[in-house]
Amino acid sequence: MSRTAADTRVLVEKSLRRRYRAERRFRIYGIVSVFVGVAFVLFLFSTIVGQGITAFRQAHITLDVHYDAAALGLDDSSDPALLATANYPAVVRNALRDIFPEAEGRVASRALGALVSVSASHELQRRLEADPSLLGSRERLRFLASADVDQLLKGGIDRTLPEQARPLSDQQIAWVDALTARGQLGLAFNKGFLSQGDSREPEQAGVLGALKGSLYTLVITLLLSFPMGVAAAIYLEEFAPRNRWTDLVEVNINNLAAVPSIVFGLLGLALFLNVFGMPRSAPLVGGLVLSLLTLPTIIIASRAAIKAVPPSIREAALGMGASRLQMVSDHVLPLAMPGVLTGTIIGMARALGETAPLLMIGMVAFIVDPPRGFTDPATVLPVQIYLWADSPERAFVERTSAAIMVLLAFLIVMNAAAVVLRSRFERRW
Amino acid sequence: MMQKAVLLSVLVAPAMFGAAASAQSARDYVTVVGSSTVYPFTTTVAEQFGKTGRFKTPKVESTGTGGGFKLFCGGIGVQHADMVNASRAIKQSEIDACAKGGVRDVVEIKVGYDGIVVAGSNRTATLKLARKDLYLALAKQVPDPANPQNLIANPYRTWKDVNASLPADRIEVLGPPPTSGTRDAFLELVMQPGCESWSWIKALKDVDESRFRRVCDAIREDGAYVEAGENDNLIVQKLVANPRALGIFGYSFLEENLNQIHGSLIEGVAPTFDSIASGKYPVSRPLFVYAKKAHMDVIPGMREFVTEYVSERSMGEEGYLADKGLIPLPAGELAKVRAAVLSKSK
Amino acid sequence: MSFSASLLLLLALIALGYWVGRSRSLQLVGGAGGIRRLHSLPSYYGILAALWCGLPALLVLALWAGFQDSFISRLVAAGAPAEVLAAGPAHVGLFMNDVRNLLAGSIASESASEAVRAAAGHYIQLRGIARMALTGLLVVIVIVGLAFARARIAPDYRARNAVESVLEKLLLACSTLAVFVTVGIFLSVIYESVLFFRQVPVHEFLFGTTWSPQTAMRADQVGSSGSFGAVPLFVGTAMISGIAMLIAVPVGLLSAIYLAEYATRRFRSWAKPLLEVLAGIPTVVYGFFAALTIGPALRGIGESVGLDVASESALAAGLVMGIMIIPFVSSLADDMITAVPQSLRDGAYALGATRSETIKQVVLRAALPGIVGGVLLAVSRAVGETMIVVMAAGLAANLTANPFEAVTTVTVQIVTLLTGDQEFDSPKTLAAFALGLVLFILTLGLNFLALHIVRKYREQYE
Amino acid sequence: MSAAIDSQSSASPATPAASLPVAEGIKTTGRVTVDNPIICARGVNVYYDDKHALRDVSIDIGRNEVLAMIGPSGCGKSTFLRTINRMNDTIPGARVTGQMVMEGQNIYDRRQDVVQLRARVGMVFQKPNPFPKTIYENVAYGPRIHGLAANRAELDEIVHTSLRRAGLWEEVKERLAQPGTGLSGGQQQRLCIARAIAVDPEVILMDEPCSALDPIATARIEDLIDELRESYAIVIVTHSMQQAARVSQRTAYFHLGDLIEVGETDRIFTNPRHKLTEDYITGRFG
């Protein structure tokens, strides 16, 4: 070789600057990539929270109402049928007109009444039905303001726009300002968002129905997928002979874990709705579909947990004369349980956030009453988000983001539980 | 212990589920399907009804008028819808289909009027359109300008091509698919009158109606007309994002979104509450809800729901449906509808 | 509810069976002192006895619960008023719904008709009889099972083996469920697809370039021509997935490399979970975000540089989908990179390679098959992703290569075709199942390939 | 990640050929210096986190000689080997103090470039670790990254020469395009040696290069080491005393992190001076 060590040194030195530049560049690409991901997480969360946090406060109007028999068109408060059909909006309008007597005529009166949510009438009806003796009396009550007023107070409506281009007229804005100045209108905690079902009126829309729907759905999912998933994992890890059938099962499970969720929706539609004739929009069917969806996740996680139990423990148990089943139930399963539970929680979290398959089985519908059972029509949180995201009213953007916050809160709690469980019971063999 | 727990859960969970699934539960709420145009009104009534009445809130799904009738006419029984929203009157073919499914007695409720608007984003100037312009812009085949007797594939790319007084923007219209009642009404109220500007086509109507329909009702499929599904809300959102496009939907959606979009003038008339109520706006049509009489006695709350629908506080001039953008029936007609419905639903 | 009461009763009987079996075995060998003479522990005899009386009883209970209602209903319906019977089975069904609603308390009894109230009374009476019969039957089954078990129990009877073989079969049954799910999916889409392909030829579906599934709903209607050429959907899906992969693969891979090879332990300990948060966010949230924030923002940017960007552009959906897939790629790549043995890195370092040279030319080269497998899995995920595209990608079936235009995807069309119009014989609805079949086969193929590659790679270093 | 470096003194301006002075009170038995050293280690300490793995080691590495390092497991011989080309940098928590001077330049100096250092000090590992590339690419890898070949012909030449010198050419010349992982264990190890010498280093470090090989492959590698001595300084860690005796000129004995004794190989094996060395060599422990 003609080249000497000294030549090599010179050559190497010559290449160094270029190579270190490449090194630095590469490193920067890496950092940038990590920060792109992390920045997106922060951006997403801050956007959602920024848009949604306002939904937890809601404009309320305090009014002195007079249960005026004449306005209600009611002379006998003992007849429930009459109570149900009385003219409550008139009472609300009158209460407003007491403050703004200048609102004369049909148009002005309607505009004034539009400041208060229609739920005010329902509230009055409930009160009067509960206590018919209220008829003729007066009381001071706090009502929800309409969504437009709410948006105005939160700055969601631009006051500088021309009058036709915004939902509130100049006159209405003047009333709102006057009410605010009198201390009768202001933002307060939005209790209804967590305690009511869906509504066409943004100010009344809440997530309780969707939350209960999610709960019922997840109960079914858990009841089915957990025992079956664990049983399948035990069989595959501890009992299954190595043959073609086992291979087929394994390949199937891994494949199913990666099959698009919407395909499971098609299965649910064709099998549960069309063949078995189960009810549309029911949490029962949703839970069935989601349990098929989460089953592979749980099986895979449980298998990994079972596999992580060292063979020495199995040998020790078998060496004592335990049967395979005793070995599994007394030693392997208890040791693998934290891992199994972690996998189950993660699977449940995924099921909680799943939307697409539920669209296929009619869980997209306008459902006001929170479900009271597994066969009542229901939506779930993600579907509710989907429905609200499509609503034209601006106030629903805020609600959608707030519903997302609720959903993410649940997911974070579940994932945190999984992390804690894993770290608390993590064993090093 | 673990062994027994696993055994029990594996055994009992499927058994429980099987029993729960097979146990037929009674339906104690009203289900409504159908038009997306009527959907916002029916949901409002449903919600009011649910909040004030003793019954469960009806479940309302938005499926399009055509799809709704398919479900509605499927038959009698709890698994079939009780009511259907329709943005046009029921067609004879649907009456036949219903009869075939065993649905013979259907109560028609005319709930009010709705204008069909051709709307654009507030960021663009208001268009002044004639029905002929819309026909030329959207039909699959149009009369050849050189030889009007001859039909050619629609050659127009921009609005200016259609009518020199219009801007030179590309034609891009988001509108309802054939399953939609809005589409039927649009064909009837815009395309056919526009088409009839040519006397030979107008003459065709009496001679060869199916040919007339083929000529007038066929909408172009080369991308200028985008079938935007049944969700009118989505169209509104897309218009906001895409100011070049126009959208076809019901007046109520326009009213809810006046801060973002505005209606084009048709034959010189702007779509407003008053112009539609007075009949001056040419493209307006009645909206309907149909109810199965056979279900009336059986589904809890259905009769009460229908009664609520036709009550003064919902459909009346000052009712809550008017707040949602429905143009109420004139007082006289309302009284007639109400009387008819109440007597039929007994 | 009667069912849960019967279930409780049955559980009690099973417990009794357990106790009987257990004590019988002990009694045979003369009390606790003689346990050594038993083949199995007394509790196994108990479980076996419980299984013998419990399994058939559970089966009977499940069947009974499944058929009781329809059986009683038929009996009650037979007694329905003549005019209802004459009106046909649909009306009888409605009549029964009324009866059930009355029973469930959904309607007040005073508003129900005389016939309905009578039928409800009849129903309650029959149900009472059925419950008693069921209880009796369960008790008989349990007693027979128990007697049988008690007779079989002997000190040298292998109770444990018998119990375990039953349990093992149960476990086996659970594990085969996955296969049935796959078969079920396949069957449920294939049936409708075959119906579809009878109306629309396969080649037209797979190679046609116009997608406009708007067939006329009625005979008197002139709809669109209704063409079912799915190529625009495939192209749209490919474009959005392609954009997503263009984002996710470099970012995911580079961040995996950075976190695995460069980052300090502390940085890694907070950056990695933060990245993985992206994988846990529901897709509907991404969809909302893409439709409301990213789409309009892209449009604004496009406008400012004079580009014509549709608000539901393929770019917006692809971008957000790419972000969603980042953690998917990065955690798989991380696994693969950390699986590369340190000795290979040492070899390169010892030659004087810089860190990036080692990574690019040795570590990545070694991990390549695994990474490719991971990327394929990510592709299958992008192809099947639904909510983001439903909310952000639009419905226009444009056949275009321009990412600024709106396109539609297979999953969007499935959702659009199946939400709403629910008639099961129109090619429109069936087309959704054909699309589902294509999607299923495509992702199944991708997954199969990817898992094969990943598995093979893992074996290489184990 | 990189090990903290405690460089008390920058490079001494000593002439390259002269050895550095050894600190007073050194515990090592025997002469640690040579006349014309290429590397001088002085007072080298290595810590893994809190563990003190190597204590105050001073030794010279001579040109054209094979230095064998022996001692029981965990005695620090591999650790010392890895400090010579700073492979310890890749181990998290490793820390080195003291001086390691190569031709007048402390390799633990801040200004020292590890890449360049490793180009000059090659290494062969215990387990053959060919890259998952072709045989050709394995050998060409070093020259490529360092830019040692101007064109393809030169690179071919380097690969050819290196394989020939590693004694592998005849066996693989027909299948240069096949993966290096397909070779037998002994061939793989020679491939790794070829890979190391393709960069034309001055020192080659070998960490038990034969422990994973059968006796025949071992013999070939040993012959190879002997040939390579003509051109390179070689430091070899070995568990086999016979091997140390066969291939090395000088031997160093490590015990529990201390360098106990250094000397001519013949002398160490025939006449060890330190009690621990004697015990080890006569097989009383280890």
Image (cartoon, helix red, strand yellow):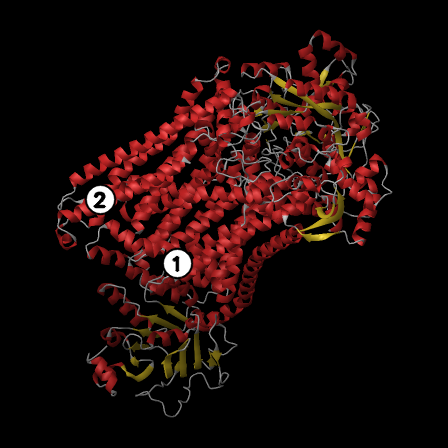
Please give left or right for residue C30 compared with residue D203 in the image: left
Quarter where residue D160 is shown:
bottom left
Q: Amino acid at mark 1?
A: Phe
Tags 2 and 1 touching, CB below 8 Å = no
Image position of C86 with respect to A380: above or below: above
One can see residue C97 in this view: yes
* Residue B191, image x, y percentages: 73, 20
* Viewer-proximal residue among D246 and C86: C86
One can see residue D134 in this view: no
Q: Residues within 10 Å of mark 1 (few under 14, many from 20)?
A: many
| Residue that numbered label 2 is attached to | C20
* Residue D257, image x, y percentages: 34, 80
Please give left or right for residue C90 compared with residue D43 in the image: right
* Residue D233, image x, y percentages: 36, 75
| Residue that numbered label 1 is attached to | D131
What distance separates the C-alpha of mark 2 from that of mark 1?
Answer: 68 Å
